Each structure stands twice: as C-alpha cells, then as structure tokens.
Image (tube, rainbow, N blue to C red):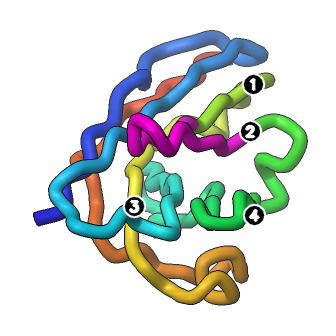
Amino acid sequence: QVQLMESGGGSVQAGGSLRLSCAASGYTYSPNCMAWFRQAPGKEREGVAVIHTDSGNAYYIDSVKGRFTISQDNAKDTVYLQMNSLKPEDTAMYYCAAGWPTRTLCTGGRWPGKYWGQGTQVTVSS
C-alpha cells in the first residue's frame, strides 16, 4: 500500500519561504510521477507542481512559476517543494500525490493524482 507522508508546512509572512517534503513508501516499483496539489477553503484542489521522476521533467502552474521548485531525492524516495516569495494567496492545505501515469499525462498539467498524503497546512500572512 502506497503511503505518502508530507511535512514542512507552517505559517510565514508574505515574502517568506517554506520547504515541503513528501516521503513515499509501500510500493514495489517507485512512482514515476509525483506532484504537489493544494486546496484553499472554498476552492477546488489544484495541481501546483509535478515531476516525472524518471526524466526529471517538471510542470508548474503559472501562478507559482519562478517562485516554487519541485525536486526529488531518488535515494530517499522523497520529493520536495521549495516555495519562495510566498503570497497570501498561496495559503492552502498542500497534498503530495504519486502514481504511474505516462510521462505525457504526468507533465501535461492535467494529471489528477492517484495516491495521496494527508496534507500539510501552509498559511501566508500579509
């Protein structure tokens, strides 16, 4: 059973930084696609950043480009989300997702996720 454990959330002021981590376990073959989603109160969950772990190709939504970076540590089966220049509108519960879609689906901006972590809260105050 795939298990994803997020950590690193917290409260920061606008302009600050946070680094989220997602440790994956419980599978025979490592996921080839890992992503970060977020859901703010009253809004739908949205994919923020995704990485195809075999190729390293990544995709970001426009609102976080240049501020967020997704990276991986294959030895630890861990994916990170470095978030800089945080804005109040980044406030949300952040979820890690993992799965085995095709590379096209993984990095095409429409992958809906497969397995999910419990989430970690990020709060950005102005």
Residue 93 appears anywhere in the view: no
Question: Which residue shows up at 51% across the image and 53% down it?
Answer: 36
Mark 4 vs mark 2, foreground winner is: 4
Horizontal and vertical percent position of residue 113:
42, 74
The extreme right residue here reads 66
Is 49 displayed left or right of 32 in the figure? right
- SS type, badge 2: strand
- Say which residue appears at 49% left-offset and 60% top-offset: 34
Residue beneath the point at 39% across and 50% down? 95
Of circles 1 and 3, the one toward us is 3
Question: Where does the magenta region start and end?
Answer: 69-80
Helix, strand or loop at disc 3?
strand
Q: Is residue 26 above or below residue 29?
A: above
- What mark, if any, has residue 97 been given in the picture? 3
**Residue 78 magenta-drawn?**
yes
Residue 75 drawn at (x, y percent): 45, 38
- For label 2, the crowd category at 10 Å Cα-Cα, with few meaning under 14, some 14 to 19 and many 20 or more, is many
Residue flagged by tag 1: what amino acid is it? Asn
Quadrant holding the C terminus: top right
Which quadrant holds the N terminus? Answer: bottom left
Tags 4 and 2 in contact by the CB under 8 Å rule? Answer: no
Q: Which of marks 3 and 2 is nearer the N terminus?
A: 2
Q: Distance between the residues labelled 4 and 1?
A: 20 Å
Q: Name the residue under label 2.
A: 68
The mark lying in front, picked from 4 and 1, is 4
Residue with the mark numbered 1: 84
- Residue, disc 4: 57
What amino acid type should be assigned to the residue bearing mark 3? Ala
